[in-house]
Image: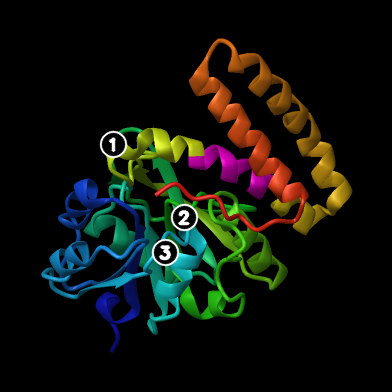
Amino acid sequence: MTDIFDEVELLTVTYKSEYIINHCLSNINENFKITIVENSNNIYFKEKLEQRKNTKCILSGKNLGFGSAFNIGAKSIKKKYILHFNPDAMINDEIIHEMYKLAKNVKFGIISVIESNEDTKVILSDKVKLRKVESVKGFVMFIDNYECMETNYFDENFFLYLEEIDLCKRLQQKGKNIYIAENIFVKHLGGKSHDPDQKEKMEVQRNWHYLWSLFYFSKKHKGIFHAYKITLRKFISAFFKLIFYYFINTKKHTIYKIRFLGLLNSYLGNKSFFRID
């Protein structure tokens, strides 16, 4: 007879997350097997993490972005279910068990939870509290591994942003349902997965990739004319603002320059190459 430890493996992607990852793991039973994909070549980080029972850390060697790193971890997992969580998502054993219980009673591709600014909690109910949705946020995802294998997981052209929505769309095209568990609330710190010293660098990187991903995603799912329609105003605005702020605000000039360049490179068909290490 199988149980939760036989069927569920946890997966998280880290990058400069030393300051927060141990707090996250401390609320998880060590009988759960955990795979961590670290987007660097930090051997010390790997050795420290693997002192924890049932924990494996894979070093990607360089910053691959979320989707590519997730795929490395997922393809090493043979269990029926994968519970993905961001390092700044405050999950615990109760959350894992409740998601597993829900998963056993429904056919699905992904189940996610309600994002909370307050405490992580489960509201117990006799009724199944699942709501079918078009897509979910990627901070916590309970994934049917066997179903997602058919999609080859995430589109690795994305470095950051919209990759989980893309995956949800592809799963639905294969007849797989996407759900939100309305009785599960997980505190998500948001943007806290990396060291606070990296905040400004990450903000620059996010702005480049959000605009790159927006055009790529729109073109992929709705065609190039729609992609231009929803991004062209942002492109023109970024161009004029980068010029305007050049004279009065260096930080804002940098942000709008980065937004302009992210979208320009997506227009030109260039890969999502931008990195700040």
Could you tell me residue 269's position as x and y percent?
75, 56
| CA distance separating discs 3 and 1 | 39 Å
- Which residues, given as a range, are shown in magenta? 205-215
Q: Nearer the viewer, residue 65 or 275?
A: 275
SS for dot 1: helix
Could you tell me residue 276's position as x and y percent?
44, 46
Question: Mark on residue 102?
Answer: 3
Residue depicted at 79% across the width and 37% down the height = 230
Of the residues shown, which amino acid type is indicated by label 1? Asp
Q: Is residue 209 magenta?
A: yes
The label nearer to you, 3 versus 1, is 1
Question: Mark on residue 197?
Answer: 1
Q: Nearer the viewer, residue 119 or 10?
A: 10
The label nearer to you, 3 versus 2, is 2
Q: Are marks 3 and 1 in contact (CB under 8 Å)?
A: no
Kindly give the residue lying farthest to the bottom in the view shown: 1
| CA distance separating discs 1 and 2 | 30 Å
